[in-house]
């Protein structure tokens, strides 16, 4: 977990004015227009840190999460959990503990050994811990090319957030993560049948009509490849109903005999 205060060169007690000043000073040094494209990633980290800490509600949420991340224990809690291999609750807590303390590979190994997506983390962690744990797991799975597993964890989180908000302002980060994952990685990583199922999953999450239109277009393309032209036509029509100006559909319209006007 990134230390936003460290990125800005500040203590956690920094005032709003100190945060603004630190951002301005550091932005001058790492802005791509000044320091070149090599600093683009550093500038993005700086912006994320500033946008979080300059908003009181987001800062409070971040402080809560980071306090948990950096928590110290008076005994070897990790060893205690590792020794309880036959206790699924202890193993769930071990996964979360390792993720919070930068033992990501070991956390993922335990998770996979317990069944991966079939292991009910939510049965053994409280709601907030489960949501935090699932998000970090999704990040690590994404880094390792396990895009479908990351997708399922993210959709579970989003569905639960819709039911009862917890992440609140951090949901923007979750949404961006999910959309980038789907657009740039998932569509190339799963077969067409599974891709259709994933698009159906997204359509149940209550996103905007434009988002749904893009996902229906992706579904229509996959259905065409599967030879299910009638179903593909229905998906494309649904996409165009949601967004009549949807781009990149001319060839699909011709293929499916949908009105080009």
Image (cartoon, rainbow, N blue to C red):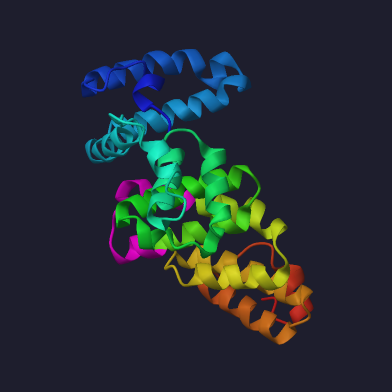
Q: Residue at x 36, y 28 (%)?
A: 50
Q: How many marks?
A: 0
In terms of secondary structure, what is the magenta stretch mainly? Answer: helix
Which segment is the magenta one? 159-176
Q: Does residue 33 show up? A: yes
Q: From this viewpoint, which residue is outermost toward the bottom?
A: 230
Q: Does residue 245 show up? A: no
Q: Is residue 29 above or below residue 61?
A: above
* Side of 200 where 6 appears, left or right: left
Which one is in front, 63 or 24? 63
Q: Residue at x 70, y 57 (%)?
A: 189
Picture coordinates of residue 148, whole percent (x, y): 61, 59
Picture coordinates of residue 23, whole percent (x, y): 36, 20
Picture coordinates of residue 41, whole percent (x, y): 55, 27
Q: Residue at x 58, y 69 (%)?
A: 199
Q: Is residue 116 above or below residue 239?
A: above
Picture coordinates of residue 122, whole percent (x, y): 38, 60
* Side of 32 where 13 appears, left or right: left
Instruction: Please check the rendered image and state whether residue 54 is part of the magenta-colored stretch, yes or no.
Output: no
Q: Residue at x 28, y 18 (%)?
A: 11
The quadrant where residue 261 appears = bottom right
**Quarter of the picture holding the N terminus:** top left
């Amino acid at each position: 977990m990134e230390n936003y205060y460290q990125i800005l060169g500040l203590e956690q007690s920094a005032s709003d004015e100190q945060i603004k000043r630190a951002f301005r000073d550091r932005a001058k040094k790492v802005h791509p227009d000044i320091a070149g494209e090599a600093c683009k990633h550093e500038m993005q980290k700086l912006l994320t840190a500033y946008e979080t800490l300059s908003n009181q509600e987001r800062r409070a949420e971040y402080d809560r999460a980071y306090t948990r991340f950096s928590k110290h224990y008076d005994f070897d809690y990790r060893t205690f959990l590792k020794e309880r291999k036959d206790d699924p609750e202890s193993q769930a807590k071990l996964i979360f503990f390792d993720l919070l303390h930068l033992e990501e590979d070991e956390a993922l190994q335990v998770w996979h050994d317990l069944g991966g997506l079939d292991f009910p983390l939510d049965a053994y962690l409280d709601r907030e811990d489960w949501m935090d744990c699932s998000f970090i797991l999704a990040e690590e799975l994404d880094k390792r090319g396990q895009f479908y597993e990351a997708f399922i964890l993210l959709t579970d989180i989003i569905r639960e957030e819709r039911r009862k908000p917890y992440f609140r302002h951090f949901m923007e980060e979750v949404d961006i993560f999910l959309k980038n994952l789907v657009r740039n990685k998932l569509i190339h990583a799963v077969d067409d049948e599974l891709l259709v199922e994933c698009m159906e999953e997204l359509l149940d999450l209550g996103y905007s009509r434009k988002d749904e239109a893009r996902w229906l277009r992706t579904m229509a393309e996959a259905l065409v490849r599967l030879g299910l032209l009638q179903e593909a036509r229905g998906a494309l029509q649904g996409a165009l109903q949601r967004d009549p100006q949807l781009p990149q559909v001319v060839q699909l319209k011709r293929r499916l005999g949908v009105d080009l006007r």
